[in-house]
């Protein structure tokens, strides 16, 4: 199996090295793992692409390339240029430093990379490691992802639930903030909602009296509903959430059409 690894934390990120280990375990050999990752951190860029500027490509070694662009750019560069003669069988995005659950999935570059892979017709899985009191002080805060990652990916592959359609499914996996031994299980979840975890801004005056704004992020995984990614990963489970890029509010199409649709 040939595996492509991308991320949003950048080519030098610790979590990328963990993803490479996981990929090598799943593929059976490090020689079947390709890395195409951003030259610089791209957290929070979501599914953006470099539509109005070119991307610089920098080979760093065998099967290892840095791209001056977003995670979605990395996928595009890999499948249409770098690996065009030997395309991947699976694309992994991560392992992200921090979880990507609930509303965070809409902002995440890690999710954006997996989403672009799915749009290009590839099997894709996003991987994120939640940081919290249970693992923040460990010598290896990625321990849960490192130890359990290969088995989770194999389970998803064995389930073989993929879709041959325009907006195919991709998977969002989050490892909880606990030691590898503290994992309570694997839960298939839905994307949650946290009423108290929205983004805001904090004003700061610089010494020259110019005004700057820092983004702030509320806390509130416990406010999400049981069965959701945010809640279950907080409580020690590895979560697997199937996602699609289609944003259509399907439940509103028919009732809205009855009111708005008109014959010419």
Image (cartoon, rainbow, N blue to C red):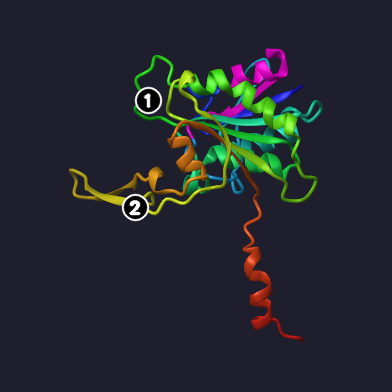
Distance between the alpha carbons at the discs numbered 1 and 2: 27 Å
Q: Residue at x 64, y 22 (%)?
A: 151
Camera-side residue: 148 or 235? 235
Residue identifier under label 2: 200
Could you say where residue 54 lies in the image, as x and y percent from the top left?
61, 40
Res 22 quadrant in image: top right
Vertical relation: 177 (above or below) 206: above
In the rendered image, the quadrant that contains the C terminus is bottom right
In the rendered image, the quadrant that contains the N terminus is top right
Q: Residue at x 54, y 23 (%)?
A: 16
Vertical relation: 236 (above or below) 205: above
Q: Do the CB atoms of the residues marked 1 and 2 lie less than 8 Å apart?
A: no
Residue identifier under label 1: 134
Could you say where residue 233 lies in the image, as x and y percent from the top left?
48, 36
Could you say where residue 243 lies in the image, as x and y percent from the top left?
63, 46
Q: Is residue 131 magenta?
A: no
User: Which callout, 1 or 2, points to the residue nearer the camera?
Assistant: 1
Q: Which of disc 2 and disc 1 is earlier in sequence?
A: 1
């Amino acid at each position: 199996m040939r595996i492509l690894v991308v991320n949003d934390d950048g080519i030098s990120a610790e979590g990328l090295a963990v993803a490479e280990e996981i990929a090598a375990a799943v593929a059976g050999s490090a020689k079947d793992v390709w890395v195409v990752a951003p030259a610089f951190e791209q957290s929070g860029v979501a599914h953006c692409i470099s539509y109005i500027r070119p991307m610089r490509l920098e080979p760093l070694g065998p099967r290892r390339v840095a791209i001056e662009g977003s995670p979605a750019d990395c996928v595009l560069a890999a499948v249409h240029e770098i690996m065009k003669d030997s395309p991947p069988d699976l694309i992994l995005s991560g392992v992200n430093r921090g979880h990507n659950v609930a509303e965070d999935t809409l902002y995440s570059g890690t999710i954006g990379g997996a989403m672009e892979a799915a749009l290009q017709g590839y099997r894709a899985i996003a991987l994120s490691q939640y940081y919290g009191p249970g693992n923040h002080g460990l010598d290896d805060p990625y321990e849960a992802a490192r130890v359990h990652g290969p088995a989770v990916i194999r389970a998803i592959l064995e389930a073989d639930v993929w879709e041959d359609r325009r907006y195919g499914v991709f998977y969002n996996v989050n490892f909880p903030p606990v030691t590898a031994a503290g994992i309570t299980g694997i839960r298939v979840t839905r994307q949650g909602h946290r009423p108290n975890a929205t983004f805001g801004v904090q004003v700061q005056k610089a010494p020259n009296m110019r005004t700057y704004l820092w983004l702030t992020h509320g806390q509130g995984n416990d406010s999400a509903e049981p069965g959701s990614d945010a809640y279950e990963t907080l409580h020690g489970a590895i979560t697997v959430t199937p996602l699609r890029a289609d944003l259509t509010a399907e439940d509103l199409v028919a009732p809205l059409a009855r009111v708005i649709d008109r014959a010419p």
